[in-house]
Image (tube, rainbow, N blue to C red):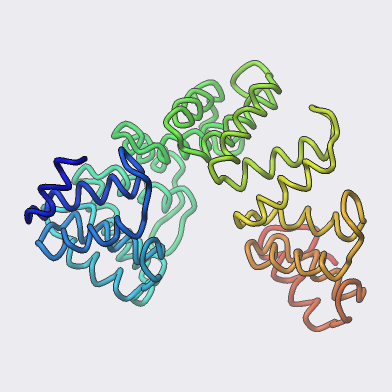
Amino acid sequence: IILAERSCNAGSANACNDVGIAYSKGNGVERSSEKAAALYARACDGDILAGCSNLAHMYSEGEGVPKDGARAFELAARACTSTHTEGCNNLGVAYHHGDGTPKDQVKAQELFHRSCEANDALGCVNEGIAYDFGGVGVQKDKQKAAELYQRGCAKGNLSGCRRLGLLLSDPKGGLTDFPRAFSLFSTACDGNDLESCAALGRALKTGQGTEKDVGRAIEAYAKACDGGSARGCEDLGAIYDEGKLAKKDGKRAYEYFEKACGLKGAYGCSELGFKFFSGADVGKDQKAGFVLFEKACRLEDFYCRNVAICLRNGTGAARDSVRSKEMFARACKGGNDLACKP
């Protein structure tokens, strides 16, 4: 890294991009998004398209620089060429989310496909997501999604391995292969894909595709949670809250749910809300509980039912029948069947 930094300071734009990657991932240096963004900017100014693409991602996520969709789109468009497909994938993401440009799912899918065909692993994964869930211009096709996830996984993209594992562990998807799913989660977790560690924990907890092992499940969840996975923290909280697979510990459950909520885990926020409503493991405070229910609702429509009930009954907040109906409808649309018949 020292030699690369010297080359960067001597005017090598390509070296600046390499050093930026090191700071972004914390490889050989202390992780710093700010330094990474500054180095990517130097690389981009030196016409290194990978630097422009990396900087686009930083602006898109607000990492090391203020979040700026328009700037992210501009940089991604510059980086999308016949020789730099990663930029095309980032441009596809911008069109998919409408970040800095009007949302255009068809255009996004074209760019993901172009990126994938040029052997960009993330492009394959993003194209696979479209087939996995369906959308504008793309008919749902689980088999096609699995093939694309496999291509991404084979090229080293761990999120592709995880998504393939999730497909193979879905009994309704028609592609069920629990042992292979377990193997994929294990490999991706070893590579520090934190959501794969959470998925690995669930497989070990239930014995899906492997022998049931609660101790190893807790270890996998802990790795995920410690690394910043809301799902890992939520599942750990549930284990200690229920007290069936480990000794019941309300305080630890509260701490894990609190961390999950801080990591934008809707289930964690919802469970915290219930604790404040009931007074279990924390002082009873229905207003605080309602605030947490609202946060969960903002994160995932599924959890808006709790807000709807509070507004209907006037618990934790003033009665508001109109807004209550809106929240029930939102939760129903979000997949909460109980909200469809309030």
Q: Is residue 78 left or right of residue 168?
A: left
Quadrant assignment for the C terminus: bottom right
Q: Is residue 111 left or right of residue 104?
A: left
Q: Residue at x 70, y 38 (%)?
A: 236
* Residue 49, image quadrant: bottom left
Image quarter in which the N terminus is found: top left
Vertical position of residue 4 compared to residue 284: above or below: above
Left or right side of 14 for 180:
right
Q: Residue furthest left?
A: 11
255, above or below 66, in the image: above
In the image, what residue occupies the spot 28% across and 44% down?
22
Could you say which is closer to the camera, residue 338 or residue 173? 338
Q: Quadrant of residue 92?
A: bottom left
Q: Nearer the viewer, residue 14 or 104?
A: 14
Q: Is residue 244 left or right of residue 226?
A: right
Residue 124 x %, y %: 32, 45
Classify 313 as above or below 144: below
Position of residue 20 measured from the top left corner of the image (x, y, whole percent): 25, 51
Query: How many marks do you count on the picture?
Result: 0
